[in-house]
């Protein structure tokens, strides 16, 4: 695409929005009140609003390589804190996608330079689930399964964050969801995770609130 075409497209987009609702941008400027925090991959094929069918202002978004929630990453922690404490989101979604380059790199011996430290978390997911993954003989299915397992582990990492736990115990929200976007079909797949049940098994390790005896 020609670089200048982006600004032409922008003008068309503005005209389309105003033709539907002359007050569209005036309303948009008044603030945001999303119910969803979406944490997904930076992959250019996976755009949150499009695949969810939502509009600007309806979903708070954070994207990084392979949809990671790394405890020492101030970026993702700041996003989660703002979403939970200030926007009061009701749902946090971790969304991975099939054919993810970051996940593929974690399956193969590959020197990715500066990305090596970032992908270490993904390699840890592979290590934690090594027996299951190595029992899958089909290479494509093994790749897909690591995508799914990575989503589950990042959902668990969300629950470890203090802002999430405090809100969870006070209000029951946010609910944590694990999804996968299938770039081969366009389907959005809910993995059906029960994170409250998953967390209960390891609560004594990661809980920041004393368990009542």
Image (spheres, helix red, strand yellow):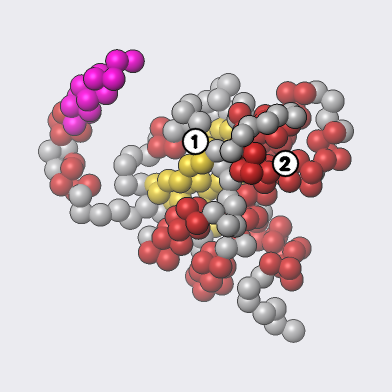
Task: State how far apart marks 1 and 2 are (Cα).
Answer: 18 Å
Query: In this view of the protein, which residue sits in the foreground, 40 or 54?
Result: 40
Q: What's the mark number on residue 42?
A: 1
Q: Is mark 2 on a helix, strand or loop?
A: helix
Badge 1 vs badge 2, beta-carbon distance below 8 Å:
no
Whether residue 7 appears in magenta in the rendering, the answer is yes
Answer with mark 1 or mark 2, whichever residue precedes in sequence.
Answer: 1
The quadrant the C terminus occupies is bottom right
Q: Is mark 1 on a helix, strand or loop?
A: loop
The magenta segment:
1-14
Residue 194 percent across, percent down from the top left: 66, 54
Residue 176, compared with residue 5, is above or below; it is below
Q: How crowded is mark 1: few (under 14 residues within 10 Å), some or many (20 or more)?
A: some
Query: In this view of the protein, which residue sits in the foreground, 166 or 72?
Result: 72
Single out the mark in the foreground, 1 or 2: 2
> Residue drawn at (46%, 28%), measured in percent from left and top?
44
- Answer with left or right where residue 210 lies relative to residue 114: right
- Give the overall secondary structure of the magenta segment: helix
Q: Residues within 10 Å of mark 2 (few under 14, many from 20)?
A: many
- Answer with left or right where residue 154 lies relative to residue 88: right
Query: In this view of the protein, which residue sits in the foreground, 211 or 74?
Result: 74
User: Which residue corresponds to mark 2?
Assistant: 123
> Residue drawn at (58%, 33%), measured in percent from left and top?
97
Whether residue 159 appears in magenta in the rendering, the answer is no
């Amino acid at each position: 695409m020609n670089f200048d075409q982006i600004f032409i497209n922008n003008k068309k987009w503005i005209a389309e929005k105003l033709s539907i609702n002359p007050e569209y941008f005036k309303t948009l400027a008044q603030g945001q009140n999303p119910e969803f925090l979406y944490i997904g991959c930076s992959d250019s094929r996976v755009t949150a609003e499009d695949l969810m069918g939502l509009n600007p202002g309806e979903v708070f978004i954070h994207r990084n390589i392979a949809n990671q929630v790394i405890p020492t990453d101030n970026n993702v922690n700041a996003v989660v804190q703002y979403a939970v404490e200030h926007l009061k989101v009701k749902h946090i979604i971790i969304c991975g996608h099939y054919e993810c380059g970051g996940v593929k790199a974690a399956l193969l011996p590959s020197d990715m330079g500066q990305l090596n430290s970032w992908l270490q978390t993904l390699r840890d997911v592979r290590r934690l689930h090594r027996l299951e993954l190595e029992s899958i003989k089909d290479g494509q299915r093994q790749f897909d399964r690591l995508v799914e397992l990575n989503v589950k582990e990042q959902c668990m990492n969300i629950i470890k964050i203090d802002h999430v736990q405090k809100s969870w115990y006070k209000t029951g929200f946010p609910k944590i969801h694990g999804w996968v976007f299938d770039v081969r079909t366009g389907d959005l797949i809910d993995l059906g995770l029960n994170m409250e049940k998953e967390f209960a098994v390891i609560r004594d390790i990661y809980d920041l609130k004393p368990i009542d005896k």
